[in-house]
Image (tube, helix red, strand yellow):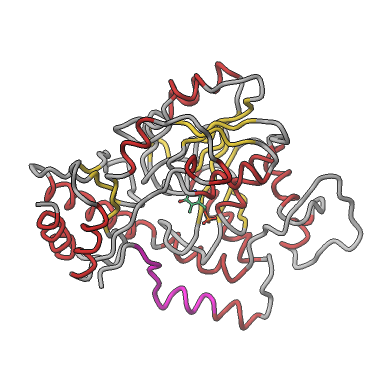
Amino acid sequence: MIRLSKSCLSHLEKSAVMKVLDKEYLGMGEEVQEFEKALTSFFGRPAVCVSSGTAALHLALQAVGINNGDEVLVQSLTYVASFQAISATGATPIACDIDPDTLCIDLKDAESKLTQNTKAIMPVHYSGGVGNLEQVYVFADRHGLRVIEDAAHAFGTNYMGKKVGGFGDIACFSFDGIKNITSGEGGCIVTNDNNILQTVCDARLLGVKKDTEKRYLGERSWKFDVSEQGWRYHMNNIMAAIGIVQLDRFEDFSRKRRELAIRYDELLTDSNINPIQHNYNEVVPHIYVVRLPSGVDRNNVEKQLLRKGIQSGVHYQPNHWLTKYKKNDKLQVTDDQYSNLLTLPLHPDIEINDVEYVCDNLLRACQ
Ligand SMILES: *Cc1c(COP(=O)(O)O)cnc(C)c1O
């Protein structure tokens, strides 16, 4: 079976985990601090580790003061995590349409949905590309909005010569099992804003002030004060030990992901299958998404691929179709594109000849 996505683990992650188990200190301590240091040097800005990408988004939103009655602009075509993180604060996610080329947020549509309650915009770096992120920041400046980037797909991507997370307001990453690097589950918040950093450090440990510093000394606060709502969102040493090794291996992972995507592109040019275009000198692809020719039955294509031992997927069911987030307005591009989107296998353990096999079978299934 050629899997759509998977964790890529070696003996290195396993022995790192064993070391933590041998030390019998499983909570948040030395390894988490070390992973944060490594991430901080990777991004060139401070990173705070948490238990998931969703937790990262939730804490970032809370830290900028997003609250009941506020509205946050976000594209409908994203994982439900983006929407749930927004609604967890009491705010309303305002589902926006996408640009048909990048499948990132359409700022014209976003502009038409601004109200006096709009406090932030959450651009989602769909499949690893950031779309027109510069314009997102211009838009946010003009309308006084905070920017919380959902960069779950964009670990390692560069934009205008800078690493995503290394510039801008706040970027949130995910290290779940299938992301560009994993810590089992996990995520991080990257920003230069010291207030935000302190707030998320406290909020990930139930709002206990300055507990992070204590934990990194192998201690914890017994006498403390709490003034804000917090959560159990910290990362633990087992996760961090995996993350440290994965970050070391990231250069190999990213080279492989790019190679595979470039091979897909080559094999699908001159066909009626239309991949999302990226500049792979900059983008590290998290998923490889194509648009099938209109009129082709996607279910049938997926079934035929599966019969050949090839998994595929669909990223994502639009959120404005879900009961919790349903609205009556149509999102023309999202609704049109969704039914043709198909995600093909992409992870570092796939070989170039697997890509050839996938494309052969895909082209046959679409005839
Ligand atoms: C994976 C993902 C998240 C959430 O990350 P978790 O670590 O799974 O909580 C958020 N947004 C997008 C677009 C994702 O793909």
- Residue at image location 19% in from the left, 64% down from the top: 304
Magenta stretch bounds: 5-17
Residue 201 vertical placement versus 17 (above, below): above
Quadrant for residue 101, please give it: top left
Q: In the visual, does 114 lie left or right of 1?
A: right
- Residue at image location 71% in from the left, 31% down from the top: 69
Q: Residue furthest bottom?
A: 22
Residue 217 position within the rendered picture, expressed as x and y whole percent measured from the top left: 75, 64
Q: Residue furthest top?
A: 142
Q: In the visual, does 244 lie left or right of 294?
A: right
Q: Nearer the viewer, residue 289 or 181?
A: 289
Residue 195 position within the rendered picture, expressed as x and y whole percent measured from the top left: 72, 37
- Residue at image location 16% in from the left, 56% down from the top: 362
Q: In the visual, does 347 lie left or right of 181?
A: left
Q: Please give the count of numbered marks on the rendered protein.
A: 0
Quadrant for residue 232, please give it: bottom right
